[in-house]
Image (spheres, rainbow, N blue to C red):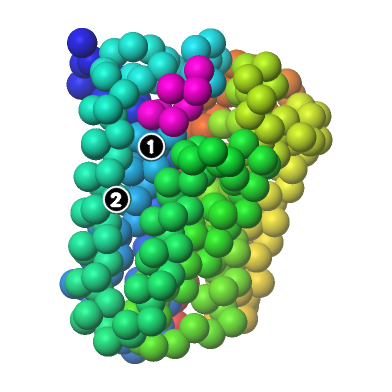
Amino acid sequence: MATVNDWLEGARVRTLPAAVAPVIIGAGLAHYDGGFSWIRTLLAAFVALAFQVGVNFSNDYSDGIRGTDDHRQGPPRITGGGKVRPKVVLAIALSFFTAACIAGLALVALSGQWWLIGLGAAAAAAAWFYTGGKHPYGYLGLGEVFVMAFFGWMATVGTAYVQTGLAPWYAWAAGTGVGLIACALLMVNNIRDIPTDSETGKRTLAVRMGDTRARDVFAGMLVSAVFIQAVVLAWLSGWLGVASLALIIPIAPTILEVRGRARGKYLIPALKRTGIFELAYALVFLLGFTLN
């Protein structure tokens, strides 16, 4: 029987900053553009979190029934580990997707931007087909593309847009920066799983690139994100852009650790620290947008 810790592992708590961080930045953007709303921000946060948790349980289910998780490098999954019946995990995933869609409809109604329902439907489809269906795009090396689209641009720009009706260039730039960190989270997770994914036919971007190049790309994503933030904040206020470059200091040890060939379970701390870094990154953006 699954324990509380097993369910938390199934929800993949370490990945949740990828859902919260872009909403934090979007809230800062809305404040800067004069249209901040607590209700709409909280609804956006709920939508993002519910989709993320739903994706995580959906991945647990889909990878589990395919046998991809039979010999994992990281913590065992609840489906692949035989701790919970697959249909139960699927039901939980669908429940989170449903909750996200209901909250999303409420957000659309408040904003009056009914065309956003189409983007919501696309997000729901992307959440399922990451590892679900006959041809999951996560098995084709396209995971990072969709992470950038939905946990970078859509979550960041969308959170601001439903409050202000605006989508300026600096919103897209900020979304690109936080999206790169979300992609780095996925990349380090997949670097850890290269040996088992290669054997089971899961051709993630890390598998396609190979171990060394994937580690270099992970580092490049994080450094590029810091640079993008510095450019945007320098445009807002020169001194803040320069000061934000200091954010590279706390993540530098993680970059060196990943590029230093840490493997298997020893990459799990890097995954956790990258998630914390994404939250810190979002808070720096929030500070920049609210101070100006």
Query: Can I make out residue 201 in this image?
Result: yes
Q: CA distance from mark 1 to mark 2?
A: 10 Å
Asked whether, in this view, residue 192 is left or right of residue 66, the answer is right
62 within the magenta span = yes
- Identify which amino acid the numbered label 1 is placed on: Ser
**Residue toward you, 171 or 146:** 146
Q: Is residue 140 above or below residue 159?
A: above
- The residue that mark 1 highlights is 58
Residue 158 versus residue 115 in the image, above or below: above
* Residue assigned mark 2: 97
Secondary structure at numbered mark 2? helix
> Which segment did they paint magenta?
60-67
x, y (%) of residue 247? 57, 52
Question: Which amino acid is tagged 2?
Answer: Phe
Q: What predominant SS class does the magenta segment belong to?
A: helix
Q: For the residue labelled by badge 1, is the local secondary structure a helix, a strand or a loop?
A: helix
